[in-house]
Image (cartoon, helix red, strand yellow):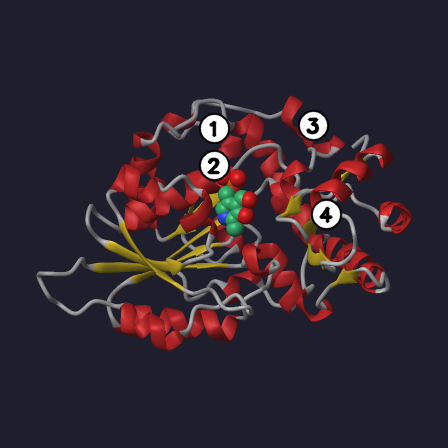
Amino acid sequence: MDYIDLRSDTVSWPTPDMREAMANAVVGDDVYDEDPTVNELQEKAARRLGKEAGLFVASGTMGNLVAILAHCGRGDEVILGDRSHTYLYEAGGISVLGGVHSCQLPVQPDGTLPLDLIRGAIRPDNLHMPITRLIALENTQGTVGGIPVPKRYVDTVGAIAQEHGIALHIDGARIFNAATALDCDPKDLVAAADSVMFCLSKGLCAPVGSMLVGSHDFIAKAKRVRKLVGGAMRQAGILAAAGLIALEKMTLRLADDHATARMLAEGLAEIPQIEIDLAHVQTNMVFFSLRADTGISAPELAERLKAYNIRVRAGGQHGFRFVTHYWIRPEHITQVLEAINKELP
Ligand SMILES: Cc1ncc(COP(=O)(O)O)c(C=O)c1O
């Protein structure tokens, strides 16, 4: 990349080997299940996460939407976090397109939803109420700092879901970051889930695409919903070719992104005008804020950093979220810290 872009890992470009694989991809019509590259990606994604089947979808938003609509009918209810991506940033698709009702529980600083509130939110059999069909968790939980949610917690929520005959979906846009940070096999981390969405884009650098995995029955339903929302693609093997590299190669190097995030966080912690909780930096996201009396706002600092070829995004008057990814190297972190030090009054 020709600038240092810390706004998100979604800005990452495909790697040179992805571009080559895309150019040479063997393709077919995926609506007829005839694209060998898509088929390979779907099989490998399912195997990697310990599920029976996989489905290639255009985006994380589409993956969550398709999953929730496959689990829930109109008027059914999903329990999810009040700061989850699905609730906040997916255009309300589950209710607009699926008539799915949501019950939002408070996301805790450790990325979990309180277990007693989950139990309490599951509806009794009462005709006045919607029917609870699904619990949706997010891992890593982005809005609280890219926090990885441990297997023990996911298993407990899975057991609650099972006890009540409802399903568990995981928005695992960054599930491989979570597994890397927790040092566990991603399969184990999602063992309790009925469905998982993860993104091949973002930190894994594919230009387009996410995967949905689950049982054969679930994926068959999801495939119908994907068609319904216009997501059945034709020679999608061109995209899946990059996805295979994302899955097989890029998932193995995420510890590097976590190390650059840590380097950045530790450098920021040494700057007196900055407030940061180092314990909260566990994956590739670094949340911090400028002290209120610093004399410069976060949007102003973001603007000034452009002169150094650095792109960042302010959250409010004082806050920032910086995200590391494949294209951010340790030398970039040094440049960013120097630039911030220079610009802070
Ligand atoms: C946790 C989470 N879920 C879902 C998505 C949606 O992914 P997409 O942008 O591919 O639709 C994002 C996007 O950043 C995300 O952070």
Residue sitting nearer the eye, 33 or 94? 94
- Mark 4–mark 1 distance (CA, rounded to whole Å): 51 Å
Asked whether the residues under the numbered discs 3 and 4 touch, taking CB atoms below 8 Å apart as contact, a structural biologist would say no
Residue 77 drawn at (x, y percent): 25, 56
- Mark 4–mark 2 distance (CA, rounded to whole Å): 49 Å
Going from N to C along the chain, the mark reached first, 3 or 2, is: 3
Residue sitting nearer the eye, 23 or 15? 15
Q: Which residue is mark 3?
A: 19
Q: Is the CB atom of the residue marked by disc 3 within 8 angstroms of ligand 1's nearest atom?
A: no
Tag count in the figure?
A: 4
User: Alpha-carbon neighbours of circle 4 within 10 Å: few (<14), some, or many (≥20)?
Assistant: many
Which numbered mark, 4 or 2, is in the foreground of this view?
A: 4
Q: Which residue is mark 1?
A: 35
Q: Secondary structure at mark 2?
A: helix
Q: For this view, does 278 lie left or right of residue 340?
A: left
Q: Residue at x 57, y 60 (%)?
A: 144
Is any atom of residue 245 visible in this view?
Answer: yes
Asked whether the residues under the numbered discs 1 and 3 touch, taking CB atoms below 8 Å apart as contact, a structural biologist would say no
- Mark 1–mark 3 distance (CA, rounded to whole Å): 18 Å
